């Protein structure tokens, strides 16, 4: 998969838009990032999964999906090795990440404003 193909897939989801964050193209829905390109370099992308989803993708496709190092990885940030990525699997990962970002934040986890 190329970066162009990843971008096309990410933007194929309803209300998805491209922006930039920390000098990387990112893809958002509801103003929340669900994927990025170019992290840690141009050979990679990233999808924001739940830890459970991350575990499944990394287990099933270890040549494609790798846990991001540090705290972000523990929260579900998952690198995608573009060269090894298959379109159907990448679409499923992007759909999961998009769906996670699209879902409304439960009221009990919203920060209260003073």
Image (tube, rainbow, N blue to C red):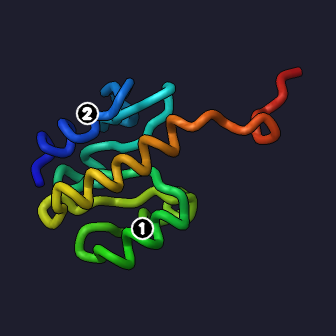
Instruction: Locate residue 4, reporting x and y percent.
Output: 12, 40
Q: Is residue 71 visible?
A: no
Mark 2 or mark 1: whose residue is earlier in sequence:
2
Residue at 38% over, 36% down: 22
Q: Secondary structure at mark 1?
A: strand
Q: Is residue 56 left or right of residue 114?
A: left
List x then y, in percent, for residue 73: 49, 62
Residue 12: assigned label: 2
CA gap, disc 2 to disc 1? 24 Å
Which of these two is toward me, 97 or 68? 97
In this view, 89 is above or below 108: below
Residue drawn at (12%, 62%) of the image: 83
Check disc 2 and report its element: helix, strand or loop: loop
Percent of width and height locating residue 30: 50, 26
Judge left or right: residue 85 versus residue 62: left
Q: Quadrant of the C terminus?
A: top right
The quadrant holding residue 88 is bottom left
| Residue extending furthest toward the top | 114
The residue that disc 1 covers is 67
Which corner quadrant of the image does residue 113 belong to?
top right
């Amino acid at each position: 998969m190329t970066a162009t193909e990843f971008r096309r897939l990410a933007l194929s989801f309803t209300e998805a838009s491209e922006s930039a964050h920390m000098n990387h193209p990112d893809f958002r829905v509801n103003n929340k990032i669900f994927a990025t390109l170019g992290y840690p370099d141009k050979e990679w992308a990233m999808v924001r999964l739940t830890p459970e989803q991350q575990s499944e993708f990394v287990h099933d496709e270890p040549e494609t999906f790798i846990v991001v190092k540090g705290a972000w990885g523990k929260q579900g940030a998952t690198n995608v090795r573009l060269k090894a990525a298959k379109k159907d699997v990448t679409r499923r990962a992007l759909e999961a990440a998009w769906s996670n970002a699209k879902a409304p934040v439960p009221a009990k986890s919203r920060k209260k404003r003073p």
